[in-house]
Image (cartoon, grey):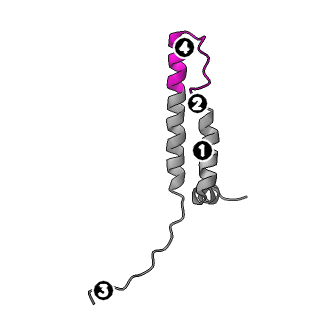
Amino acid sequence: MTDKKEILKVLADNPALTEAVKEVIAGYFSVDNLESGESDITLGQMVRARLVGLKAVNDAFREIEQYKSTKPTPKKDNPAY
């Protein structure tokens, strides 16, 4: 079985894949498709819940970014020498 860190590394190293997955998940937290027939209290609770969920999705993807591979920086000659 593939290690979880390796899977997250693949996701983090592919910006197009990361953005596509993030868009699909974030779509479930959209406030655009809420029913306006609800009471103000219920509607407010639903909006708040979706915004909290969207923040959690963004936090999770920030955490996934930590698995991104770092490219080695080439050594540069010091011009002072």
Could you say whether the residue bearing mark 1 is in a helix, strand or loop?
helix
Q: Is residue 42 magenta?
A: yes
Of the numbered discs 2 and 3, the one sitting upstream in the chain is 2
Q: Is residue 47 magenta?
A: yes
Of the numbered discs 3 and 1, the one sitting upstream in the chain is 1
Of the numbered discs 4 and 2, the one sitting upstream in the chain is 2
Mark 2 vs mark 3, CA separation in Å: 54 Å
Q: Is 52 above or below relative to 72?
A: above
Q: Mark 4 points at which residue?
A: 42
Mark 3 vs mark 1, CA separation in Å: 44 Å
Q: Which residue lies furthest to the right in this view?
A: 1
Disc 2 residue type (three-letter): Ser
Could you say whether the residue bearing mark 4 is in a helix, strand or loop?
helix
Mark 4 vs mark 2, CA separation in Å: 16 Å
Q: Residue at x 59, y 49 (%)?
A: 19
Q: Mark 1 points at which residue?
A: 22
Q: Mark 3 points at which residue?
A: 79
Which segment is the magenta one? Answer: 30-49
| Circle number at residue 30 | 2
Of the numbered discs 3 and 4, the one sitting upstream in the chain is 4
Look at the numbered discs 4 and 1 and tell me whether their residues touch, using CB distance below 8 Å. Answer: no
Q: Where is residue 56 in the image (x, y as percent from the top left)?
A: 52, 38
User: Which mark is in front, 4 or 2?
Assistant: 2
Q: In this view, does 77 lie to the left or right of 74?
A: left
Q: Where is residue 11 in the image (x, y as percent from the top left)?
A: 62, 55
Could you say whether the residue bearing mark 3 is in a helix, strand or loop?
loop
Could you say whether the residue bearing mark 2 is in a helix, strand or loop?
loop
